[in-house]
Image (cartoon, rainbow, N blue to C red):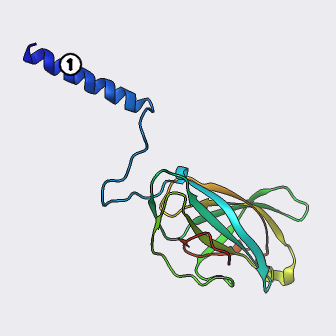
Amino acid sequence: MGKARAIRLLLGAALLAAVAVGCGHSQPAQPHAGRMSTCRSADLAAHVDSSGSEMSQPFVVVALVNQSHFACLLRGYPRLTAVGHAQGGPDRNLPLAVKQGSTYQRADAGSRRLVLARGGAASFVIGTALAYQGGAHIMRISEFRVQPPGLVGWLPVPVDDLATAPPNSAIPVTVTALELGATRH
């Protein structure tokens, strides 16, 4: 066999392998040895771990579970949007004024690097309040949409949360940084 034919055969085999990988016949990309990649929104599932209210301050603990085949990294505070309604009204996007920090139920440890094992969870707390306007004009939040820090894509989290706001203002919401584990408050 000539040198030119051997090179053509090798290139043909490489092309077939590339096409097979491009058609979805590959395994998920594994992080390089010693390096771990950031979690992807598509690999995370979000759910309510616990909820309640203390001292007129409702809270929801949200867990993000790594459903990928590999450990991945998360760090920081999630972004939030909310859907809900005033008493008797239709669901709509609700204006939020999100603040990062401690809630009544959980001290905020601040942003830090978390290694989320395969099947592992990280959690954070979303806190609202019912005391604004003497508890009048209560909004019922039916869904938070969570964007994990530094990622693209939003994860829906169905909830049944209550909140009030100062007159003509967005709903004040506090969110803690992610921490390892799906912890009860």
Write down the quadrant of residue 50 in the picture.
bottom right
Q: Residue at x 87, y 77 (%)?
A: 136
Write down the quadrant of residue 17 in the picture.
top left
At mark 1, the secondary structure is helix
Residue 85: % across, % down: 82, 62
Residue at the extreme right: 88
Which quarter shows the C terminus?
bottom right
Residue 179 or 166: which is nearer the viewer? 179
Residue type indicated by callout 1: Leu
Q: Report whether 91 appears left or right of 88.
A: left
Residue at the extreme left: 3
Q: Residue at x 76, y 79 (%)?
A: 129
Q: Report whether 133 appears left or right of 171.
A: right
Residue 3: % across, % down: 8, 18
Query: Image height check: is 38 above or below 139?
Result: above
Label total for image: 1
Residue 168 in sight in this render = no
Query: Image height check: is 137 above or below 146?
Result: below
Residue 179 or 175: which is nearer the viewer? 179
Q: Label 1: which residue?
A: 9
Residue 119: % across, % down: 55, 58
Residue 125 in sight in this render = yes
Q: Residue at x 80, y 79 (%)?
A: 130
Residue 59: % across, % down: 72, 75
Write down the quadrant of residue 104 in the picture.
bottom right
Residue at the extreme top: 1
